[in-house]
Image (tube, rainbow, N blue to C red):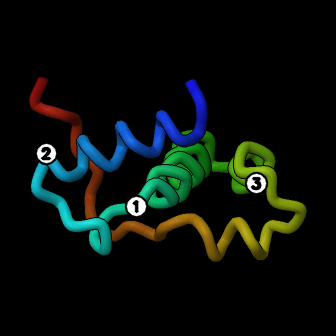
Amino acid sequence: MTVAMLRRRFDLTREAAGVQKSEFQMRDLRAKAGTDKAESIGDILQARDQLGHTTVVMTEQYIRHRLGKKVTPTK
């Protein structure tokens, strides 16, 4: 799959879901992956490596600090 193919499928899926481009972009998935890695392992260095950053400072800017209690999914 090429980058263009992935981009087109992502755009079509977002459009089908009725989500505006300004509300959700491909890079949001990258930030979520970094956030999930940092939270699940408890080590920002692992998230830094996964995202390919050279500094923890950049990773800290990238990951999201979510508030609230985590719950398990319904299904």
In this orientation, which residue lies closer to the viewer: 25 or 43?
A: 25
Tell me the kind of residue under disc 2. Answer: Ala
As helix, strand or loop, the secondary structure at mark 1 comes to: loop
- Up the image or down, 67 lies above or below 29; here it is below
CA distance separating discs 2 and 3: 33 Å
Q: What residue lies at 66% left-to-right and 71% top-to-bottom?
A: 60
Q: What residue lies at 48% left-to-right and 67% top-to-bottom?
A: 64
Q: What residue lies at 58% left-to-right and 39% top-to-bottom?
A: 3
Tell me the kind of residue under disc 3. Answer: Arg
Number of marks present in the image shown: 3
Q: Quadrant of residue 53?
A: bottom right
Q: Is residue 51 left or right of residue 73?
A: right
Mark 1 lies on residue: 25
CA distance separating discs 3 and 1: 21 Å
Circles 2 and 3: CB atoms closer than 8 Å: no
Label 3 crowd bin: few (<14), some (14–19), many (20+), radius 10 Å = many
Q: Position of residue 72 (x, y in %)?
A: 22, 36
Q: Position of residue 45 (x, y in %)?
A: 78, 52
Label 2 crowd bin: few (<14), some (14–19), many (20+), radius 10 Å = few
Q: Nearer the viewer, mark 1 or mark 2?
A: 2
As helix, strand or loop, the secondary structure at mark 2 comes to: helix
Q: Position of residue 6 (x, y in %)?
A: 47, 36
Q: Quadrant of residue 12?
A: top left
Circles 1 and 2: CB atoms closer than 8 Å: no
Tell me the kind of residue under disc 1. Answer: Gln
Mark 3 lies on residue: 48
Q: Quadrant of residue 10?
A: top left
Of the two numbered discs 2 and 3 on the same chain, state the one appearing first in sequence: 2
Q: Is residue 71 left or right of residue 18?
A: right
Mark 2 lies on residue: 16
Q: Position of residue 59 (x, y in %)?
A: 70, 66
In this orientation, which residue lies closer to the viewer: 53 or 57?
A: 53
